[in-house]
Image (cartoon, grey):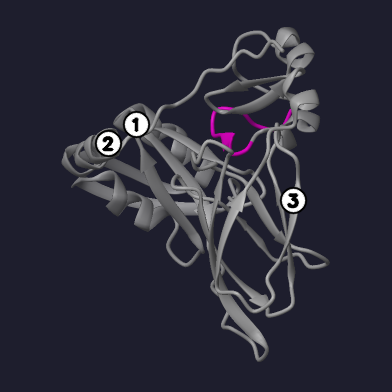
Amino acid sequence: MKLSVLFLICSLSMTYAAESYAQKTMISLEVRNETVGTVLEKLKKESGFDFFFNNKHVDLKRIVSVSANNNNIFKILDQIFAGTNVKYSVLEKKIILSTEIVQGIQQGQIKVTGIVKDANGEPIIGANVIVKGQSTGTITDIDGRFVLDTPKDAILQITYIGYVSQEVKVSGKKELNIILKEDTETLDEVVVVGYGTMKKETLQDLSAPSILPSSLLDLLHPQPMLYRVE
């Protein structure tokens, strides 16, 4: 089996260093009535951070204004995503944007927390966790963790490219430990890169980074901000 892998190796010390850098780096930014996508591009240039996300979870066309004078990046992100359910985590100089469920727990529902790992016990970042038969779902954070409000008898569908999809019955449990097995057939055809996963033949057809066709966006888990729909 041949597999080219470019991993972002995470450790506690590296995460701490990234958080320290994010807190100490002061940024000044003034924008009025511009899209979230445009503001993130400007913020990337000013801060040196890369932004990763699933394009289904972040509205890049939403209009925002930002006024920051020597603020750290977290305070600026608070302005950009005020009033939304977008949250963010730091991994090295990468900022991962994801969403959290903000709806109240309905009768018959429970709050389920869980962690998704591979067979070696490493957390899987950006795995999709969906309530079967519903549109409710989330993605795992940099620690492979997720939080979701679900019916007690719900079935969760966990998917990530390169791994065998798995269905897990909640059965009233509030904590889940999920292990995904590698899909060896898929891995033979997939290259894992810093921003997601792609078929080998697809990657060979791509040139310099700028624009990806929309058919490829669903392959990015999560999607980098530097790519947009063609």
- State the quadrant of the C terminus: top right
Which residue is more in the foreground, 105 or 52? 105
Which quadrant would the N terminus be assigned to in this image?
Answer: top right
Residue linked to disc 2: 18
Q: Position of residue 56 (x, y in %)?
A: 67, 49
In the displayed structure, does residue 46 sit left or right of residue 137? Answer: left
Percent x, y of residue 12: 28, 39
Which residue is found at the position 38% from the left and 33% from the top? 10
Between tags 1 and 3, which lies in front? 3
Question: Amino acid under label 1?
Answer: Lys
Callout 1: 10 Å neighbours few (<14), some, many (20+)?
some
Residue at figure coordinates x 44%, y 26% from the top left: 8
Element assignment for label 3: strand
Per the rendered image, the range of residues in magenta is: 221-230
Kindly state the secondary structure of the residue where label 2 is placed.
Answer: helix
Labelled pair 2, 1 in contact (Cβ < 8 Å): yes
Q: Which of the 4 image quadrants contains residue 217?
A: top right
Mark with earlier residue (1, 3): 1
Q: x, y percentage for residue 164? A: 75, 40
Residue 222 in magenta stretch: yes
Q: Name the residue under label 3.
A: 166
How far apart are the two marked residues, 2 and 3, measured between alpha carbons?
A: 33 Å
Q: Label 1: which residue?
A: 93
| Residue type indicated by callout 2 | Ala
Q: Does the magenta stretch include residue 191?
A: no
Query: Does residue 50 appear to the left or right of 133 in the view shown?
Result: left
Magenta segment main secondary structure: loop
Q: How crowded is mark 3: few (under 14 residues within 10 Å), some or many (20 or more)?
A: some
- Look at 75% across and 9% down and name the residue there: 205
Q: Give the Cα distance between marks 2 and 1.
A: 6 Å
Q: Which mark is residue 141?
A: none
